[in-house]
Amino acid sequence: MNQDTTDNNASRKRPALHHDHHDNHNDSGSPNHNHAAELAVATAAGHEGHDGIDFQTDHHHHHNVNDQYDQHHHHHQHQHHMDDDRSQQSESNDHHCLDDEPEYIAAAATRSNSFIALPSAVLEHILIYLPFSYIGLLPMLCTSLHSEIGTQSPALWRNVILREGWTEPKNVPADSMTLYKSFFLSHDRICQRVEALKVGVTKLLTPDNDVKVSKEIALSSLDDCQFDLDPSEMLMNVWDDHSVLIVSQMDCVVHLHQVSTQSSSDDKCVREIMQVRLAPVPISEETDCWLTKMAIGDRSILFAFDVDSQSILTSIMKDELLSNSTEDTIECGDCLKKHELLLMVQDFYDRNPDHNHLRFLSDLFERPNFANELAFYVIDLIDVGHGIFCVLVNINNYLGVALLSFSASNEGEGILDFFEIPRANDVIGSLSSNMEWTHRSDPVEIICNIGSFDRTVETMAVNMDRSGVFHRTRFMISCRSTLNLYSLHTLRTPSRLVRYSRGEGVLDVYDMEDDLPSENLPLTTEFNTLLSMKHLGNDYVMMLCRRDAISAPADEDIDDQRNVYCLYFIVIHIPSMEEIYVSRITSIEKVDMMVAIGKECTIVAAVQGKGCCFSSRHV
């Protein structure tokens, strides 16, 4: 396959989102004479003779730490004299990254204290002109640099924020240094993580490409996966910071993949360590079975199956799944538990006959043959902590929609509460929550995103305490969508509700506290399909978009590469309503992907027909 990835550089600037790979990035914050500052640093740090290191600016993309490390690692073995040849070296195109040689820098700094003795304001002024990787490395050399850099003046962190083209933080307090520093580091870490993911995906698409992936990346080829990765027929959830669980929906087989180190090198790969089929009904029966949904909790996993057009819930403890991983099939029994939704709702009704949200079903439950007249179909399910799951169900496909809280633990298995969602029928929908950033003792906010086939989209938030009891509805937002309902995306961030429902490259952003109209966030990138939209820690949203190829005459100027497919990686900082990272991969083939996000910004991407990419700082 012939792939074109010439636009592998990433942009963190909103005004100019797609730089040429060889731009010098001349702006007010990064002048061309920053090489003089690097020489000053090298000289003051006591670099002498063969022990010296030539500090040179990476003009390819100096603000991307991963690019410096990945693309220039093979230059690190060179050492240079820092005497009369220095002027010639400064004009050369060799680029050196310090990430792999901190011990040499530390040794040089130890030989001379003249640089460390500089006043903090002077030191920070020098650092403003250096690439970001140097700013991050110098505090690692000694306690003096660690305590001095960025502690006396906010100028360093404010300038690097402006140098990236990012909007300054709002409501700056008196102690602005801490705010500017944490603001920059937060942005930079998120951008690096997504950049590492993009480079890993590039390597999957073009295995012969000499691009060097980050040490925080692990890859698996299609041969390692042992089944065809098709996002339209699979589910994927992060198991932990080293593993991912992938489900093949058609054959109900779960695959656990884990990061490991290749024996021949230090490169990381993702290998399959478990493959087992789950059977909610005896395998001897000829049934049409489809694994439709999956949610991973702290100790257990909840699965939803569609068996002959009927929904079946099953659960299994995580350690029991691992202990039975050598089996070909796990059937319902002691290990894989089957939960009859109808019987559990009936049991809940018998215990709570006066429950307000069950009154519309009371007549059915009083009938002797209610089991033949009532059915529940699972729309979506999520984990909300403490062994509790929330399940969104459609009742009889016409009676309405309800939200259930459900415990799969051995101590308290069953329905904990039932919440009727008004005015909803003939729907598809999704669930999300704010559990990720909520204290374990505080109530959880459940976001229900529901779309009817008349293209009406309703989003509501329901508060649930940690015992699984629903208390109140915070808001209801309704709109008409111009998209296919399966293309709707809604998610909650700590400060906002973000929805993509209108198409046209525009996000609707709602304030969670004020009853105000939504703000429009137009994206600067043109695309046809939103493949994924995920919350990426704090108030960041990562979007994965695809722009389809457009046929163009052979003699027409196609510098914009309209004749190829483009896969865009976009990171948005919601409070500032700003795209802080945009980068793309181009391909002559249509690329389909699925993304799963775990704790601490662990990202796993499955590329159809290619393999998996695992990005985590723990790798």
Image (cartoon, rainbow, N blue to C red):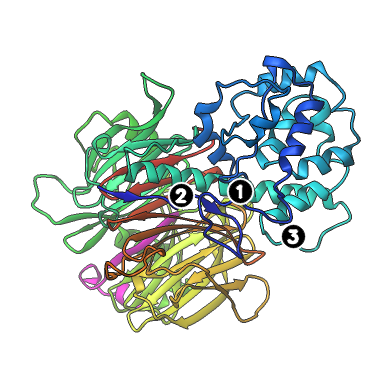
Magenta region: 362-382
Q: Which residue is mark 1?
A: 440
Given the image, on which type of amino acid does mark 1 rest? Answer: Arg
Q: Earlier in the sequence, mark 2 or mark 1?
A: 2
In terms of depth relative to the viewer, which is nearer, 297 or 40? 40
Observer-side mark, 3 or 2, equals: 2
In terms of depth relative to the viewer, which is nearer, 472 or 542? 542
Q: Are marks 3 and 2 in contact (CB under 8 Å)?
A: no
Badge number at residue 162: none
Q: Earlier in the sequence, mark 1 or mark 3?
A: 3
Say whether residue 371 is magenta. yes
In terms of depth relative to the viewer, which is nearer, 504 or 458? 504
For residue 506, side relative to residue 37 (left or right): left
Q: Which residue is mark 2?
A: 8
- Number of labels in the image equals 3
Identify the secondary structure beneath mark 3: loop
Pointer 2 local density, CA inside 10 Å: few below 14, some 14–19, many at least 20: many
Given the image, on which type of amino acid does mark 3 rest? Answer: Pro
Badge number at residue 169: 3
Q: Position of residue 205 (x, y in %)?
A: 32, 46
| Figure check: 385 above or below 368 | above
Could you give the CA–CA distance between mark 1 and mark 3, rounded to whole angstroms? 29 Å
